[in-house]
Structure formats: structure tokens, C-alpha cells
Image (spheres, grey):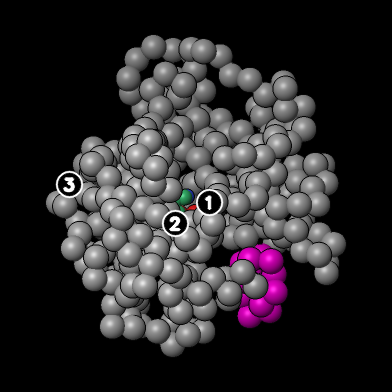
Amino acid sequence: MTGKMGRFAFFEGAIRPYSEAKISIATHSFNYGTACFEGIRFYWNESKRKCVVLALREHFQRLFQSIKILKIELPYTIDQLCQITLELLRKEGYQEPGYIRPIAYKKDETIGVRLSGLGGEIAIFTLTFGSYYRNEEDVRAVISSIRRIDDCAIPARAKITGAYVNSALAKDEALATNFDEAIVLNSNGRVSEASAANLFLVRDGLLITPPVTENILEGITRKIVIMLAEKELGIKVLERPVDRSELFIAEEVFITGTACNIAAITFINGQPVGKGKIGPITKKLREIYCQLIKGGLEKYSYLITEV
Ligand code: PMP
């Protein structure tokens, strides 16, 4: 992820210079991966001359779900964290798109693998951020040899730092073999998601996506896309297990995420998806989503927070 780091961070209860926000090498979460994070996007709205944040509350709601699983207790409410984030963005005064990274962690400096009896803390930092892929309309994917972590190993529905070794292994293998992205199967050999995005396919004009019980992150973009497909395009969305071979007969495949927005998968393992270029449903969804995220659709303004 490229981008310029912000000048400030929320760290140990206050907004401080970014350079002063540092943890010890003995911090529990650094040693054992016991932290939970979020990735939130903000966009520059030219007509309002303001930045707008997408699904701010929804992301903190998911963070609270993740920290519940990891037993991280924070002395803040979701409302307070939304306000702190907006304050941080106002202080930065960005006039370009960017990314917000809240990270809740086990702060104790101690040795010992456990979850209980450890203090919790949260840090928030921001950076400028443009496009995630070379071309969001032409992403070439490979089916990874790395399997998705199972709910009984590390729950994928929680955004746990330690679990991202799984994503890193998959993404790295894809990049090392000259693909843009990895499609990861779960331990049952069914499709779960991409390295950091949820996956949809189009078959017979219907949208299909793996359900939340297939070891996926419960994506916020996924939820928005399901709503847009049904409400704006009148397309039925089926949440059901997806076989590996369905990837090769789908008319369209696309992935969704805060970082990548809606990105078209045009080739899988070197085979063209449909005609090997972005399909009509993916294109339409991208157009609507693009309007929504910049605050251009009144109907969905509840998902947008002005800075
Ligand atoms: N799956 C994984 C593993 C991810 O890291 C992400 C990015 N947060 C997603 C899916 C997409 O989720 P969201 O739409 O909430 O960004």
C-alpha cells in the first residue's frame, strides 16, 4: 500500500505527532499477533470541498465484534472512536483520498500466550491512498495453494493481525508468480475470498457469493454491494457455498473491499473470465458504488460522514 503517512496519530488516549506513537518490543500484540484492526477509506468530495468517510460507524462496529473475540477491552464507545477519527482527519486537513487504520491491541509488556488479564489500547493513524491495483477493471488472479484459516483455528470474521499471515502468504505467492491477486479456498476446498477482499460471481445473471460461514471476513463492501445489486439493479443475490470449478464457468467474477472497491477479475489461472474483460454487471455496480462513496447518492448518505 503506497501513500504518505499522516502527521498525527491517536495513541495512548491523545492525538500526538505520528513520530511519538511507538510501542515497546515486548508488547503482547507485537509478539503474539493479538491485535484487531480496521481499514476505512475517506474520499475527497470536490463539490463539497471536504473529505467524506465511508461507513465509519460500520467499521467501528466490526472492530468491536473482533475485539470481543480477542477479549480486548477498550475504554471508548463506538461514538467516541468515530469522533476521535474525525478530529484526527480535521487536524490533518487532507484534500485527497486516504485510508484510516484503527488498531486495538493487547498493550501489556509481558511474555505468555493468553488473552485474559491483559490491558487493551487503541491507536488510529491515517495516510493518503490511491488505487490498490494497477487497474481495478483488469485484475488477474490465481487460485492459491494457501488455504483459508478455519473458524476453529483463527476466526476469519475477526480482523485479527496474526491472521493476516494467511493473507500475506497467499498474496505473496500470487505476486511472485506474476498474478495480481490470490483466490483462497477454505479447508473444504470451496471458495472463501481473495487475500483482502470478498468474492462474487455472476452465473445466469444472478450474483453468488460465499456465505459468512465459509471462513470469510464479513465485509462491509460486500454488504453494500449486496444491497446495491438488489435495490438498484434488481439482481438477486445468493449467499451459498461456491465450488472451485464455478470460477471457470462464471460469466463475471469480481472482488469487493475497502481498499480495492469493486475490482473485476478478468483472468483466473490464465483462463479468461467470460470474455476476459470487465462484464456488464461488474461495470454497473462499479459506477453506482463510485457515486455512493463520494457522497453522490442522497439515498445512501447515511453511509457517509463528512469530515
Ligand atoms: N476479506 C479480507 C480478508 C479483508 O482483509 C478485507 C478488507 N477489510 C475484506 C475481505 C473486505 O472487507 P471490507 O469490505 O469490509 O473492507
Instruction: Specify whether 15 is left or right of 71.
Output: right
Residue 67 picture location, percent across and down: 44, 40
* Residue 66: in magenta span: no
Tell me if the residue at label 1 has its CB under 8 Å from ligand 1: no
Of the pair 146 and 43, the residue shown nearer to us: 146
Of the pair 40 and 140, the residue shown nearer to us: 140
Instruction: Look at mark 1 in the image and give the residue it sits on.
Output: 133
Q: Are marks 3 and 2 in contact (CB under 8 Å)?
A: no
Disc 1 crowd rating (10 Å Cα; few below 14, some 14-19, many 20+) is some
Residue 64 picture location, percent across and down: 48, 47
Disc 2, SS = strand
Name the quarter where the C terminus is drawn: bottom right
How many marks are shown on the rendered structure?
3
**Residue 304 tag number:** none
**Residue 187 tag number:** 3
Disc 1, SS = loop
